[in-house]
Amino acid sequence: MQRLINRPDEVVEDSVRGYVKANQHLLSSTDNPRVIKSNWSPTKGKVGIVTGGGSGHEPAFIGYVGKNLVDAVAIGEIFSSPSAKHFADAMRAANGGAGVACLYGNYAGDNMNVKMAVKMLKREGIEVKTVVANDDVASAPLDEKHKRRGVAGEILMWKVAGAAAAQGYDLDQVIAVAQKAIDNTLSVGIGLSSCTIPDVGHPNFNIDPGKMEIGIGHHGEPGVSVEDICSADVATRKMLDTILHDELFASGDEVVVLISGLGATPINELYIVYDSLCDMLDAHKITIEENFIGNLFTSLDMMGATLTMMKLDDELKQLVQAPCQSTGLSKF
Amino acid sequence: MQRLINRPDEVVEDSVRGYVKANQHLLSSTDNPRVIKSNWSPTKGKVGIVTGGGSGHEPAFIGYVGKNLVDAVAIGEIFSSPSAKHFADAMRAANGGAGVACLYGNYAGDNMNVKMAVKMLKREGIEVKTVVANDDVASAPLDEKHKRRGVAGEILMWKVAGAAAAQGYDLDQVIAVAQKAIDNTLSVGIGLSSCTIPDVGHPNFNIDPGKMEIGIGHHGEPGVSVEDICSADVATRKMLDTILHDELFASGDEVVVLISGLGATPINELYIVYDSLCDMLDAHKITIEENFIGNLFTSLDMMGATLTMMKLDDELKQLVQAPCQSTGLSKF
Amino acid sequence: MIILSCENLIKVANKIIESKQYLSDLDGLIADGDHGINMAKGFSMAKEQILACSPAPSFAESSEMIASTLFNDIGGSMGPIYGTIFFSLSEVLDRDQIEAVALYNAFKFANEELMDISEARKGDKTLMDTLACALESMSLAIADDKSDPEILAAFSEGAKQGWESTKEMVAKFGRASRLGERSIGVLDAGATSCYLIISTLVDSIVADLD
Amino acid sequence: MIILSCENLIKVANKIIESKQYLSDLDGLIADGDHGINMAKGFSMAKEQILACSPAPSFAESSEMIASTLFNDIGGSMGPIYGTIFFSLSEVLDRDQIEAVALYNAFKFANEELMDISEARKGDKTLMDTLACALESMSLAIADDKSDPEILAAFSEGAKQGWESTKEMVAKFGRASRLGERSIGVLDAGATSCYLIISTLVDSIVADLD
Ligand SMILES: Nc1ncnc2c1ncn2[C@@H]1O[C@H](COP(=O)(O)OP(=O)(O)O)[C@@H](O)[C@H]1O
Ligand SMILES: Nc1ncnc2c1ncn2[C@@H]1O[C@H](COP(=O)(O)OP(=O)(O)O)[C@@H](O)[C@H]1O
Ligand SMILES: [Mg+2]
Ligand SMILES: [Mg+2]
Ligand SMILES: [Mg+2]
Ligand SMILES: [Mg+2]
């Protein structure tokens, strides 16, 4: 295992400590070392935006804590949900008296821990409502949408909800717009290599040289098919077709495109994918209003990329384009 | 080779085209497809800032084209200097009538191509002066400093010079402050794996599992020693000691720290390195005024990291902290 | 009469701690190989806490300590799942001397609470299979008016059957679920830890039976 | 009389194009393995350009086309280095019928121009070794009043010696230089392409000798 770490079971502690030291202008630690909060949180009267999940997806989740974005985040072990207490503490840190929106991804552990945290907070009189992201088209068919995992589309959900909360939306409105955001967002991933969890020490699964896995999950959950590696054009076409199959997007739509590397893929390849995608969406008469490209939601040292598309209406467009500041995403 | 590309020999064309499409708010292509220019370039009466180099280091070099940063960039093949014509065209694109500062890294090819480009521009009556970055401590001893390669320290040189040019420095002043910036900057890298040039198709060199290479260059130029992988703390100590050995930095100094991943190293590990470094610099009574952490100057899919430190005086500090905008580096 | 004390739970914790590698290996065959790590971490911490108390805490108090450690410090699925189980036990088993039927009621309540937070059901290749079979077997023994030792034996025996039944199942929950048919032939890790917990608890109770 | 035409340079280009893999393999042993790619790309483009001209361009014109292709389209070190060489040749060899000594003067001028842009010198394990040895050997043949065919043979022979001498050298320039002592035992890629260019040029000139 070729890694720059201290003890494998301290990767999360060490890196979060370094991250907080490096970004004091944006965020700070809390009494719970597994919770960090934005310097603007809590803002009295503003809905608090909370998320959380396993580590190893950096900059997600900590990288989206900042101004007009996520207020507090619960940090789990590598690829493992934060505990109920961590979620509860993040909710407490984000609570400005106007309730808390906990916007997270659809994984069994996160579902259970958030559910318990919400119960705890309720006893304290803090209202928490949740939206569960399920943007990963490849993880279940449309008629079992509730089973789909949440992946990089979560970033757009946080962006929209963070902007909405900053603009004074109340809790129900924030929840409604976050739900609309994720309902309008679909993602799909392609994996070209495995990844290694430091505490495990060997690759998490296997992708043979020359092969790629379409629809892979960002913890390496097996995809829908293993195929020979194809050109970026063909791979982009496969990803786009998977997304279009849901029939959410239609000619004339305005969209946000988010392309994330999974960690070890050079970012110039993400731009090759974007270049292909522009031509394909042009042909479909779908207009790209915004794009976010980079290592935005990773899987440790996995090679591959994810494509996320969000369909815009006037409200979503305004919220996506509103200014924000964080290490993972900034808009001027 | 696990890559998302079309034809291996079109990686640069395809990715640059995608990059330009994705960042129209910041930059645009020129008649020469290997030259891109900032939307603010040329600015009449402002010194033009130009750089360039081989591709495969993304976001370097294209990612530093933007506002108050680099005006135009010449783009080479993967790990290969742009041609003399590309450099010349970048200089032309950046020329606002106040001369052009070409700030690049110390590689034989770049040196020769820039030299020829400067000659071409001279014939056209455009004054170009150059600063050659040589921040890589491990690439030659201090008494052969002119042989040292330029690595991630170039980013800080561009930042400083870009801000200076925006503040109205004339050509000689920009050159002087860029030279001061790089003279005050030292870098060192650690490699944990090789990288694969798409057009070559197999790893460029070899690092055995369990080994790391101290002082590696960002094209994989062999380092000063191959050792067993150690903890992030020890690795950070080795990098810092290599830098301190030059005796540029002393107790009481204020510095900028830049930590870049080489491409495939998860960014949480960069924060582990930063966490260690903070403690070590504390002990040396060296104060970190600014930090830049991320995949800022990469080597395709190489694992590893580089540490760069720049010693500040009042002028450098003000210029480093001035606002700028680009995909690789932004300051609000 | 069944006598409950913190000792029962110390033994359970020890069992989990010594099975760390085995549980991780099983998890590694069809999922991410960390079940032993997660479980051993939680039960070591809880054990320390129980042992640090003086006087020795009651079964209910110890059970609550396990639950809160799991809720507080163990993320993933195991924190809320086993946290809910031990929290439920601590709520119901508030006396130190009980009949076997009271143990049944406590685990039945735990199982219901669990179904409230997890959508997994019997047959989905999770620890639910162990728990559900254990409860069914125990309830039959109670309906048959069996003695306490027989009821306890039925509890443990049912847990074992439930555990073993996961081998031929297709995983529907957790990381293993994405393997589909390929998950057949391997015992479920969570079902294994659940069997170890139930059988160790039963053994320790039986050893103390008067 | 030596007769020069674009044909000589087409043959040189073909030689480089067909040696693509060999040159890259050599470069790969101690550097980044792209020398063949860089050279073949430049010479293919230049060849297309030469062939597209009608009437056929002169040697000088063809040489300038090669130079400008290298300057414009080939980055790295090869663009400016071979660009300078062919540009220098195009400046000096402006007649189609020359003596061998004129060829010597042209290459000597190219070598000087090259030393102006590159700091590499003979002994540094670069194409300079091929060029320098070729010129030395040629100048001896000229001093000895040898015939044109003999002078040409000496040019080619010297290039070969210079090329082969790089095998035992330590690289001081280019990517191979960081290997230090470890670069010993391998022929330099640039020295190899330079030998191929000189020897192919000589062979094609000799074939046309009247
Ligand atoms: N939703 C669920 N409900 C009940 N049990 C589950 C659920 N998801 C997973 N499990 C159980 O959890 C076990 C795996 O636990 P563990 O490896 O510790 O956590 P993780 O899956 O987060 O790595 C599985 O073997 C299964 O028995
Ligand atoms: N500064 C230099 N001067 C002369 N020749 C050089 C210099 N640097 C490198 N070379 C030659 O270039 C050759 C490598 O060329 P090539 O592989 O095409 O470029 P790169 O080194 O950029 O990958 C070396 O074998 C050497 O002969
Ligand atoms: Mg796990
Ligand atoms: Mg090269
Ligand atoms: Mg597991
Ligand atoms: Mg080379």
Image (cartoon, coloured by chain):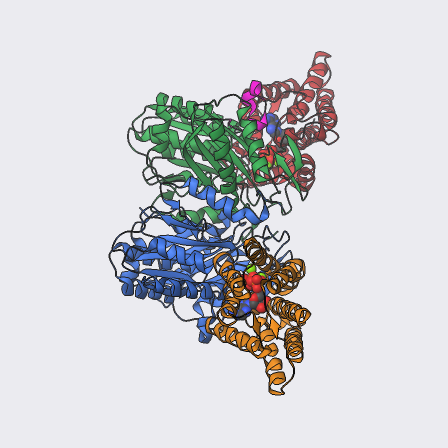
Chain colours: A green, B blue, C red, D orange
Is residue B237 found left or right of A65 in the rendered image? right
Q: Using the image as rendered, state which of residue A158 and residue A42 is in the foreground.
A: A158
The residue most toward the bottom is D144
Q: Using the image as rendered, state which of residue C206 and residue D6 is in the foreground.
A: D6
Look at the image and tell me whether residue D67 can be seen.
Answer: yes
Q: Residue B247 occupies which quadrant of the picture?
A: bottom left
**D142 up-or-down from B79: above or below:** below
x, y percent for residue B159? 35, 55
Q: How many marks?
A: 0
**Residue B53 among magenta residues:** no
Q: Using the image as rendered, state which of residue B106 and residue A101 is in the foreground.
A: B106
Look at the image and tell me whether residue B253 can be seen.
Answer: no
Q: Quadrant of the N terminus of chain D?
A: bottom right
x, y percent for residue D70? 51, 60
**Residue at 60% of width from left, 67% of height from top?**
D190
Q: Using the image as rendered, state which of residue D125 and residue A60 is in the foreground.
A: D125
**D175 up-or-down from C146: above or below:** below
Q: Quadrant of the C terminus of chain D?
A: bottom right
x, y percent for residue B305? 50, 55
**Residue at 34% of width from left, 54% of height from top?**
B94
Q: Quadrant of ligand 3?
A: top right
Q: Main secondary structure of the magenta part?
A: helix
x, y percent for residue B189? 50, 60
Magenta-highlighted residues = A134-148
Is residue B302 found left or right of A313 in the rendered image? right
**Residue A136 among magenta residues:** yes
**C195 up-or-down from B328: above or below:** above
Q: Residue D148 occupies which quadrant of the picture?
A: bottom right
